[in-house]
Image: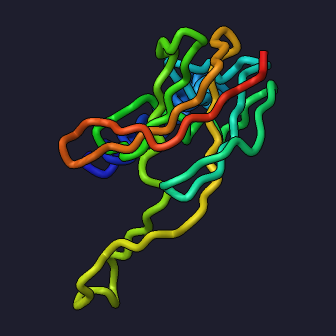
Amino acid sequence: MGDKLVAMVRVLFILFSFSTLEANDGSLNEVEQDKSIYKLHVDALAEEARIYTIVGDGKSFKLKQSYVGKPNKKFLRKTNLVTKRDRYVIKFMDEDNNILMRLGIGDPFTAYAQHIGYEDSERFSFQVGEQEISTVIPMEITPSNLIIEKRDVNDSFAQISAINLDIQ
């Protein structure tokens, strides 16, 4: 009697497992198709956004490229609002010097080496030199100036560079 009961429970378990897989199959495909990056300040599905590429070394910056186009996922992943971990911030200003948007870019000029082989080192961070930084903002925002600021030890931001944008 015990062997028949075990066999019957196994058969019912297998049948139940297959029926739940078939019932959930459609909803799993819908979830996989709906994977997109959601940002509060930029719509990932937008066909057009303002994309700015700046080049700098932490002390001076210049505008390399500015265009309107569809933002790619790499730019959207790296474009974030300001957090406490951001050492550098990009501010977009209008003609009257009102802040339109602030985006945090972290600290792209420092590389950290806290892994095997550096345990006895006195320094764990190194300056990496000139970096290219791309940011994305919505089309509704039309900045006239781009200001790069750096966070100091008092947790306030000091202006490093200002770039005039002649783009409409």
Here the colouring is: rainbow
Q: Residue at x 26, y 36 (%)?
A: 156
Q: Nearer the viewer, residue 14 or 125?
A: 125
- Residue 153 in the figure: left or right of residue 129: left
Which quadrant of the structure image shows residue 67? top right
Q: Residue furthest left?
A: 154
**Residue 75 pos. (x, y %):** 64, 39
Q: Residue at x 56, y 35 (%)?
A: 162
Compared with 129, 57 (above or below) is: above
Compared with 62, 80 (above or below) is: above
- Residue 86 in the figure: left or right of residue 132: left
Q: Nearer the viewer, residue 75 or 98?
A: 98
Residue 26 appears in the figure: no
Q: Quadrant of the C terminus?
A: top right
**Residue 127 pos. (x, y %):** 45, 69
**Residue 147 pos. (x, y %):** 52, 32
Q: Residue at x 70, y 14 (%)?
A: 139
Q: Residue at x 32, y 43 (%)?
A: 151
Q: How many numbered discs sit on the rendered protein?
A: 0
Residue 64 appears in the figure: yes
Q: Nearer the viewer, residue 136 or 145?
A: 145
Which quadrant of the structure image shows residue 23? top right
**Residue 82 pos. (x, y %):** 39, 32
Q: Nearer the viewer, residue 19 or 110?
A: 110
- Residue 38 in the figure: left or right of residue 110: right
- Residue 39 in the figure: left or right of residue 112: right
Compared with 160, 31 (above or below) is: above
